[in-house]
Image (cartoon, rainbow, N blue to C red):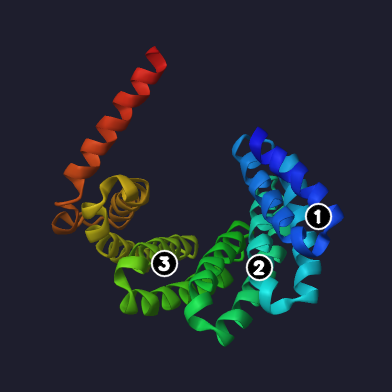
């Protein structure tokens, strides 16, 4: 945090002297500082820095849209998350919607470059809509995100299958919110299937992705009074159990230290 603050201070001075050269770096440093403040629970300060970053990117994008609209969209998403951290959900939703609109335009012009960002932003928007009780809209946006990730994963499975899995998990949660439990379980099962190969290859990388999916699978099977899919979970459960045991041991050692 201290280093991030120093970086902002230095770039403020540079941007004051040479704005055309250093304002982009200042905005980037402000977003970085905002994220670090947020991680430490200093949410008001994080929001302030994220707002500053957005203001800089708005001016830069107005002058040079081709160069800076992607950064503007990312900054809108960052500000939406910081607003959500403070319970300002309507404002968060507005910013997230603006981010999606920018990415839709960018992806229409350069799909290979910006469709991944569009899909991620659609998931973000779906989560904000769901938090405000706008469940059908959330389901629609989550479905759009899945459709984009399905195409991306078909072309580049190694890069995008994990993100497709996470998007399917978001879709499953949206189905639950609309009391469509059978469809939720189907989406959840597909999410686990999609993530299975990456998880087994890199269990540490995807442990915290897979664990909630499996837990939700068990909860939804119980709610529907059906048996969990043992064939699906068979290769996954031993690896999860080992990682959970290891994490608990590390936690215990930390408490004893």
Instruction: Identify which residue is drawn at 35% across, 63% down.
Output: 165
Is mark 1 in CB contact (under 8 Å) with mark 2? no
Residue 242 placement (x, y as % from top left): 21, 36
- Identify whether 213 is placed above or below 122: above
Q: In terms of depth relative to the viewer, which is nearer, 115 or 166? A: 115
Dot 2 or dot 3, earlier in sequence: 2
Q: In terms of depth relative to the viewer, which is nearer, 243 or 159? A: 159
C-alpha separation, residue under disc 2 versus residue under disc 3: 32 Å
Instruction: Bin the neighbour count of mark 1 within 10 Å (Cα to Cα): few under 14, some 14-19, many 20 and up.
Output: some
- Identify whether 246 is placed above or below 172: above
Q: Is residue 45 left or right of residue 139?
A: right
Figure quadrant of residue 230: bottom left
**Residue that mark 1 sits on:** 15
Figure quadrant of residue 68: bottom right
**Residue that mark 3 sits on:** 180
Q: In terms of depth relative to the viewer, which is nearer, 244 or 60? A: 60
Element marked by disc 2? helix
Instruction: Identify which residue is drawn at 86% across, 54% down.
Output: 17
Q: Can residue 1 be seen in this view?
A: no
Instruction: Identify which residue is drawn at 42% across, 65% down.
Output: 167
Q: Which of marks 2 and 3 is in front?
A: 2
> Residue 196 bears which disc, if any?
none
**Residue that mark 2 sits on:** 73
Element marked by disc 3? loop
Instruction: Bin the neighbour count of mark 3 within 10 Å (Cα to Cα): few under 14, some 14-19, many 20 and up.
Output: few
Residue 124 placement (x, y as % from top left): 56, 62
Instruction: Identify which residue is drawn at 83% across, 59% down.
Output: 18
Q: Is residue 238 visible?
A: yes
C-alpha separation, residue under disc 3 versus residue under disc 1: 52 Å
Q: In this view, does 88 lie to the left or right of 181?
A: right
Element marked by disc 1? helix
């Amino acid at each position: 945090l201290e280093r991030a603050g120093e970086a902002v201070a230095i770039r403020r001075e540079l941007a004051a002297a040479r704005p055309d050269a250093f304002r982009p770096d200042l905005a980037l440093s402000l977003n970085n500082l905002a994220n670090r403040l947020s991680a430490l629970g200093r949410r008001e300060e994080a929001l302030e820095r994220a707002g500053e970053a957005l203001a800089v990117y708005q001016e830069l994008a107005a002058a040079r849209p081709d160069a800076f609209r992607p950064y503007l969209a990312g900054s809108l998403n960052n500000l939406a998350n910081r607003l959500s951290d403070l319970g300002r959900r309507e404002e968060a939703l507005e910013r997230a919607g603006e981010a999606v609109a920018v990415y839709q335009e960018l992806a229409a012009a350069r799909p290979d470059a910006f469709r991944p960002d569009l899909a991620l932003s659609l998931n973000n928007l779906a989560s904000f809509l769901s938090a405000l009780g706008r469940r059908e809209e959330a389901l629609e946006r989550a479905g759009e995100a899945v459709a984009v990730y399905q195409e991306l994963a078909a072309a580049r499975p190694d890069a995008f299958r994990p993100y497709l899995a996470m998007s399917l998990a978001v879709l499953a949660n949206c189905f639950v919110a609309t009391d469509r439990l059978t469809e939720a379980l189907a989406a959840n099962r597909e999410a686990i299937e999609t993530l299975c190969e990456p998880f087994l290859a890199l269990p540490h990388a995807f442990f915290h992705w897979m664990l909630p999916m499996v837990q939700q699978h068990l909860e939804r099977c119980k709610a529907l009074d059906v048996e969990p899919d043992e064939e699906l979970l068979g290769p996954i459960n031993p690896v999860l159990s080992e990682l959970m045991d290891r994490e608990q041991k590390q936690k215990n050692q930390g408490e004893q230290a």
